[in-house]
Image (cartoon, rainbow, N blue to C red):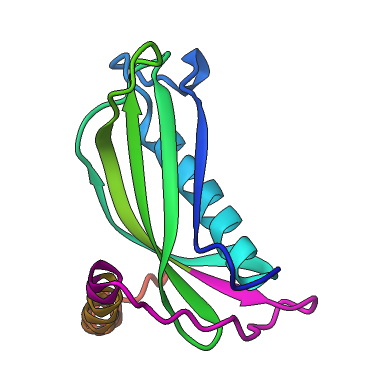
Amino acid sequence: MAGLERQLTLRFLAEPADVNFGGKVHGGAVMKWIDLAGYACAAGWSGKYCITAYAGGIRFVKPIHVGNIVEVTAKVIYTGRTSMHLGVDVKAGDPKDQDRHLTTHCVLVMVAVDDEGQPTEVPDWKPELPADIELRESAIRLMEMRKKIGAEMQAHVDLQPSLQVP
């Protein structure tokens, strides 16, 4: 049922196929896991198919090693009319003990879509706890920053010389 569970955690072992040339888990593999957890969380919250509209502020804090237990936790931190902002934490550690350390963090924006692929409304999430209120306010501040960054990026694109073949 939509609008009930705002957090989801995926748990699995990092596999040899996830390794990069440096012997650690590849950043692209971590980004895929983030997207999977984000989709599962957003679909669960909205009760709809969801697409990733934005992934930002990705911080790779520590490496993940092959054989580590990996926990990818996605949590709804803000809802708009059709979108959900999710805070995503990736933690990892030796599966033989309970210690998990933060390896990656980011914010995702997922949009719920209908059968025709058009944005559709999502259940509203209203924070009650002080920490959740701060997460929501942070998501709103990040949204405002993304608008400014988007304008700057568009200006950069507009200033590029056209690629015309003589």
Residue 40 at x, y percent in the picture? 60, 54
Q: Nearer the viewer, residue 121 or 60?
A: 121
Q: Residue at x 46, y 22 (%)?
A: 14
Residue extending furthest front?
129
Residue 95: in magenta span: no
- Asked whether the viewer can see residue 153, the reply is no
Residue pictured at 62% horizontal, 74% vertical: 112
The residue depicted at 30 percent of the width and 76 percent of the height is 136
Residue 127, percent across and down? 36, 77
Q: Percent x, y for residue 6?
A: 50, 63
Which residue occupies 35% across, 76% down?
Answer: 162
- Is residue 116 covered in magenta? yes
In the image, the segment drawn in magenta is: 110-134
Q: Quadrant of residue 49?
A: bottom right
> Which of the 4 image quarters holds residue 116?
bottom right
Left or right side of 138 for 24 = right
- Name the residue at the right extreme: 115
Q: Relative to 39, does residue 17 appear above or below in the rendering?
A: above
* Relative side of 13 to 148, left or right: right
Kindly indicate the quadrant of the structure image that contains residue 166.
bottom left
